[in-house]
Amino acid sequence: MLLWLPLVIGLGVVLTIFQAHLREEQPPWAVLVGISFVVVVFLALIPQFTSSFGALTALAREAQVSSIYLNPVLKTIGVAYLTSFGVQISREAGEEAISGMIELAGKLVILLIALPLLQAILYTLFGILGF
């Protein structure tokens, strides 16, 4: 299960060295190599994400946690990972302003996802306090 990690690390180090040389001669190709690596690794990790989300769902079901509480958490994790990939790719291309906007958009989406959960927590708290 974890045997893919040394492969990803090794390939990442080799591609980093290759990119350092390629960036001097062909900067657009260096960015393309980085993006390709990210996409390939992300696609290879999708089964791992799926099994992790399945395990979290099963754990929540055993603990009798409602999906109202679990779904926002899982969505937030997904948004955080996707935002992180977008930010890193933009930074790799040297586009700090774009990466900043991607980061801001990701934070806003996470806030919007968390609002129903925050509302449920506040209603529960108000019910306990008698408001």
Image (spheres, helix red, strand yellow):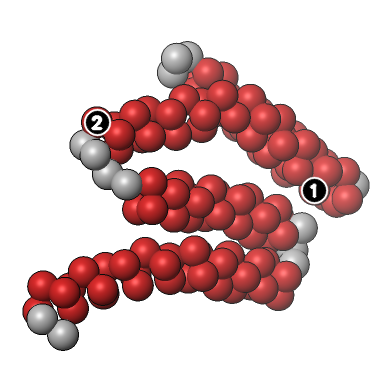
Label 2 environment density (alpha carbons within 10 Å; few <14, some 14–19, many ≥20)? few
User: Image quarter for residue 10?
Assistant: top right
Q: Give percent across and percent down for residue 46.
A: 59, 30
Please indicate whether residue 6 sits to the left or right of residue 100 in the image.
left
2 or 1: tag closer to the N-terminus:
1
The residue at which mark 1 appears reads as 31
* Quadrant where the image shows the N terminus: top left
Instruction: Give me the residue at 24% from left, 39% from top.
Output: 64
Asked whether 44 or 117 is in front, the reply is: 117
Where disc 1 sits, the SS reads helix
Instruction: Give me the residue at 71% from left, 75% from top.
Output: 97
Closer to the eye: label 2 or 1 = 2
Q: Which amino acid, by three-letter code, is at mark 2?
A: Glu
Q: Give percent across and percent down for residue 25.
A: 89, 47
Q: Which amino acid, by three-letter code, is at mark 1?
A: Val
* Quadrant where the image shows the C terminus: bottom left
Q: CA distance from mark 2 to mark 1?
A: 45 Å
Asked whether 129 or 78 is in front, the reply is: 129
Instruction: Give me the residue at 61% from left, 51% from top.
Output: 82
Q: Give percent across and percent down for residue 111.
A: 48, 70
Asked whether 51 or 86 is in front, the reply is: 51
Please indicate whether residue 45 sits to the left or right of residue 57 in the image.
right
Single out the residue that lies furthest toward the bottom: 131
Q: Are marks 2 and 1 in contact (CB under 8 Å)?
A: no
The residue at which mark 2 appears reads as 62
* 124 to 48, vertically: above or below: below
